Structures are given as structure tokens and as C-alpha cells.
Image (tube, rainbow, N blue to C red):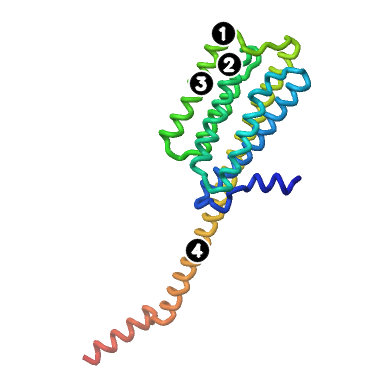
Amino acid sequence: MTGFVNKINYAGIDFAKTSHDKKCILIINRMSIILSILMFTFACFALLFKIYMLLYFTTPFLFAFSLAPWFNSKGWLTFSKFFFCFVPMTCLIIICIFNSIEQGDRFFFLTTATIPILLFRKTWLVYSVFYLNVAAFVFAQWYQSNHAPILTIPKEIEIIYWYFTLISVFAVLFFVIRYFKGDSEIYEKELEEKNDLISEKNKEITDSIKYAKRIQQAQMPSEKNFGIHLRRLKNKT
């Protein structure tokens, strides 16, 4: 089981040309695993409480999220980035149209809005996809406030669903923050190692200069001897 998870986790890593590409592949694969588990859990929730209509979107999106590592394994990293940015957002919009505002699905936009920050370097792309998620959140809030849900579930189940949604949001945000922290710590460690290497090289250069200076001073006559030789030369002339 561990080997299978690692295979998904590192799918496409051989196609990484830069450290940024490597980071993108890893986070897409890991987020894909997390979101697939979430969709599978929602599907089990639907079966447990006999809310079979939930399966209409949990099943296809479970399949969609599982595709991202496969795209990476084919070397389609750019496509995978955009796919992974827009599929979760589309999934949430559909879920929010189905469900009521009390179920809290719209709060998942807090997690999808972080995805472009992780995957893109170009500022305009980050802002564009981020604000698109903000617009999707506003739309979901407006739609759920003004339209009856397609899917209605009993109040007691709705409360359980609401708590499960919030726990899932916190879990995904924790993963993102932990990833950022881990990435930052690795960068700081690399920076410290480079600074230590530079300091060591500077010390070697400084020691070499001091050693060369001592050799020159040892070969050159002292000021006293130099003065004596200079007076002898003057006397000879």
C-alpha cells in the first residue's frame, strides 16, 4: 500500500526540469490524494445516510482528481497545473448548487484559492485564478441565499455534514500551511549551508593572504637592515 501511495506521490518527478517544477508535481500529487480521499469519504457518507444523489458529483470528481498524477506521469505539467486549479473550483460550484447554504461547502473556496499561489510563478496568473475563486465564492453565497437547494437532507444529517465540511477545510489548510513551512525551512537550511560555505571560503582566502604576507615579510629585510644597507650605498657613492 505504501509503495502504491509513493508511486502516485512521485508520479512524473523525472520530468521536473527545475526545483519549482518538482515542488509543483509533488503538491499536485499530494493534494490529488487528499481530495480523492475527501470525495471517497463524501461518497461513503452518501451511502451511509442513503443520500444517493450525492454520488452524482462525488463519483465523477473522485475520478477527475485521480487524473492529475496520471497527467504528471505523462509529463503534462502545465496542463496539470491548470487542470488542478479549475477542476476543484468547478466541483465546488456544482456542489454549492446542489446543497444548501447551511452545509458550508462554499468554505472550501478558501482552500482552492491557495492552489494558484503554490503552482504559479507569474503574478498575473496567481491573482487571476485567486480572484476567480473569490468570485466563485461570492456566486455560491448569492446562489445559495436566493435559490432552494436541489438536494435536501434531514436536519440532523445536515449538521453532521456541516461539521465534516469544516474539519475537511481545516485539514486541507493545515496541509497547505505545513507544506509552505516545510518548503521555507528547506530553503533556510540551504541558505545557511551556502552562507557557511561562503564563510569557510572567505576564511581560507584570508588565511592564504595572511600566510603570503608572512612569507613576504620574512624575505624582505627589516627597516633597520634596510637603513644600514642604504647608508653603505651612499658612502660608496
Residue nearest the observer in this picture, 120 or 64 = 64
Residue nearest the observer in this picture, 52 or 196 = 52
Q: Position of residue 54 (x, y in %)?
A: 68, 20
Secondary structure under the numbered disc 4 in the rendered image: helix
Camera-nearest label, 3 or 1: 1
Tell me which label, 1 or 2, sits earlier in the chain.
2
Badge 2 local density, few (<14 within 10 Å), some, or many (20+)? many
Alpha carbon separation for disc pair 1 and 4: 69 Å
Residue at the location (58% across, 49% down)? 12
Q: Position of residue 131 (x, y in %)?
A: 46, 25
Badge 4 local density, few (<14 within 10 Å), some, or many (20+)? few
Alpha carbon separation for disc pair 1 and 2: 9 Å
Tags 1 and 2 touching, CB below 8 Å: yes
- Residue furthest out toward the left: 237
Secondary structure under the numbered disc 2 in the rendered image: helix
Alpha carbon separation for disc pair 3 and 1: 16 Å
Alpha carbon separation for disc pair 2 and 3: 11 Å
Q: Identify the image quadrant of residue 111.
A: top right
Residue at the location (63% across, 37% down)? 66
Q: Position of residue 158 (x, y in %)?
A: 71, 13
- Apparent side of residue 211 relative to residue 184 in the rendered image (left or right): left
Residue underneath mark 2:
97
Q: Amino acid at mark 1?
A: His
Residue underneath mark 1:
147
Label annotation for residue 136: 3
Alpha carbon separation for disc pair 4 and 3: 54 Å
Camera-nearest label, 2 or 3: 2
